Image (cartoon, helix red, strand yellow):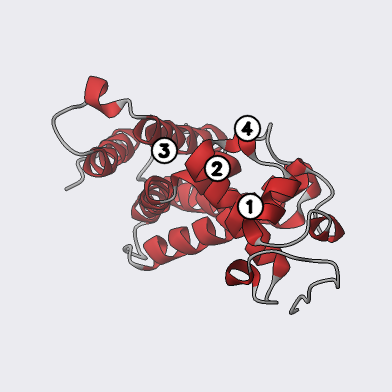
Amino acid sequence: MTETTDAGETGDPKRYHHGNLVEALIAATVEIIAERGVEHVSVREAAKRAGVSPGAPFRHFRSKAALLTAVAEQAMDRLTAAVAEAQAAADGADPLAAVEAIGQGYLQWAIANPTHFQIISSRKLIDFEASDSLRSQNEAIRQRMAALLTEAKRQGQLAPESDVDLLVLAPRAFVYGLARMAIDGHFPEWHPAEPPALAVRRALRLFISRIAGLPRS
């Protein structure tokens, strides 16, 4: 739906152009976070950056949390697309390769989009439970991982006694930790031998190979 400005809206037309106000406010919010930090975000500041009147955004976002939740929803859409693209390139007959692809897609996206990753990964900044899209897309990835790991167990890639629920949690925690370390700048102290973008990929491959207990090229 195309938004139009209220009669009282003013500001720099270079930013808004009578286009989609929600998208303009989300883009402005991402810019503020990247430049000044999330603590400087407010609905009014996003309005100023987008070039609309202070009251215009409140038709859509009644609070900072609502605005940041919209940023998180945009991030989740893009993360889901990145994960799907990575899975599409994986060996469809190898469920562990698909699990690894989910992690690799997640890592590549997170490192390339640190501002979006910061918002989507902090439950304190957003209203996760109030967002149907965040909950459904997050659950879809979790269920996909559970199905792949269940199939890997059926094929004998995992030990018969493997707890699939824990195996869903472990890779998720591992890739989240790698992404967080890379974005927060920890790699010079912990792994200076190669660039973070390469190190995280190699570390995940090692992790998946140890879950399987099998050599992986």
Disc 1 secondary structure class: helix
Task: Name the N-terminal-most of marks 2 and 1.
Answer: 2
Nearer-N-terminus badge (1/3): 1
Mark 3 or 4: the one toward you: 4
> Height in image: 34 above or below 39?
below
Disc on the earlier residue, 4 or 2: 2
Q: Residues within 10 Å of mark 4 (few under 14, many from 20)?
A: few
User: Which of 4 and 66 lies nearest the eye of the viewer?
Assistant: 4
Check contact, mark 3 vs mark 4: CB within 8 A: no
Between residue 205 and residue 40, name the one nearer to us: 40
Measured in 3D between alpha carbons, the distance from the residue under mark 3 to the one under mark 4, in whole angstroms, is 26 Å
Q: Earlier in the sequence, mark 1 or mark 4?
A: 4
Image coordinates for residue 74, horizontal then vertical, percent: 60, 58
Labels 2 & 1 near each other (Cβ < 8 A): yes
Where is the N terminus found, in terms of image quarters?
bottom right
Q: Is residue 14 visible?
A: yes
Residue 129, located in which quarter of the rendered image?
top right
Give the residue at mark 4: 39
Q: Amino acid at mark 1?
A: Val
Q: Amino acid at mark 3?
A: Val
Callout 3 environment at 10 Å: few (<14), some (14 to 19), or many (20+)? many
Mark 3 sits on what residue? 175
